[in-house]
Image (tube, grey):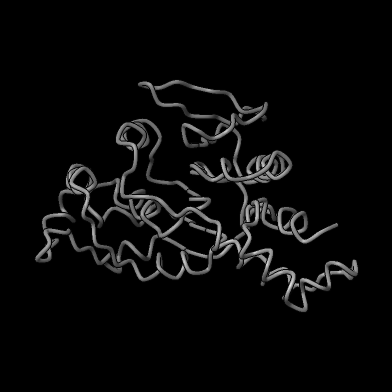
Amino acid sequence: MDNKHIFEQITGLKPNKDILKILNNTPYGKTYKNNIKLSTSTISKITNLAEMVSNHETSFFRDLEVYQIIKSMILSNEMKIWSAGCSYGQEAYSLAMLNGNSTKLQNFKIYASDISKKAVMTAIKGNYSIYRKDEQKRLTLFSPFFSQELKKDNLNNLLISIPKNIKDTIHFFQHNLLTPPPLEKFDLIMCRNVLIYMNKEARELVFKNLERAIRAKGWLVMGSADPKPPKPWKMFSINNSIFWQYQNE
């Protein structure tokens, strides 16, 4: 198996020329060629290379209708949520702020993971500068209590520093979706615009891992361009937004 296929097997992503150059010119790259069993540290190093081909495009309350449905029809006081492929953390923080008044966030827990260590470390810090007007409006709409305290810089960018009581509802960690899920029986899993970058074999493995992680009748939210999950996921179209519910009892 060549370096390209081994990288795809470990991460599910297609390597670019820079990654292949690193693999071909490092000891662990040569290890692959000799079919020597990979150590845990070697696999970790290869996983970290995924940063070079990962797309971390995200924003607060991305797709207005999706968050409106989650807030009005899915969110409840006792929930366990997984932001799978959380990028720089805006999705996880958006979920944490959906209750409006942050003092009510103590009754549910959010887990947020990404294959990129850099993305996870950025998410943990929770500092953002928002220049997009539509994103600023969405933040004001969903979290008026929080947004009232925010300031802008001299370029009119909205400056955000996530407060501790919101951070405390979220556990950020590095995780490869091709490996077993961190926990089981989540009520809601967000896995949006992640699988579009993976090959067919990787997608199938991720769906199996998501099935292991979700509870019966739990919800899965994916991006509009993501592949459709197989049975026993059932599709629901709610106000022109697609949600998937796990039907296996």
Nearer to us in this view, 114 or 22? 22
| Quadrant in the rendering for residue 206 | top right
Q: Can you say whether 248 is above or below 61 in the image?
A: above
User: Would residue 131 appear left or right of 205 to someone viewing this image?
Assistant: left
Nearer to us in this view, 134 or 27? 27
Nearer to us in this view, 106 or 157? 157
**Residue 195 horizontal/vertical position (percent):** 58, 42
Q: Can you say whether 129 is above or below 210 in the image?
A: below
Q: Can you say whether 166 is above or below 66 in the image?
A: below
Q: Quadrant of the N terminus?
A: bottom right
Name the residue at the bottom extreme. Answer: 27
**Residue 56 horizontal/vertical position (percent):** 45, 55
Q: Can you say whether 164 is above or below 5 in the image?
A: below
Q: Quadrant of the C terminus?
A: top right
User: Would residue 104 appear left or right of 170 to someone viewing this image?
Assistant: left
**Residue 19 horizontal/vertical position (percent):** 64, 64
**Residue 3 horizontal/vertical position (percent):** 77, 61
Give the mark count: 0
In percent of the image, x 70 and y 41: which residue is there?
208
In percent of the image, x 49 and y 42: which residue is there?
193
| Quadrant in the rendering for residue 248 | top right
In percent of the image, x 43 and y 46: which residue is there?
78
Nearer to us in this view, 112 or 128? 128
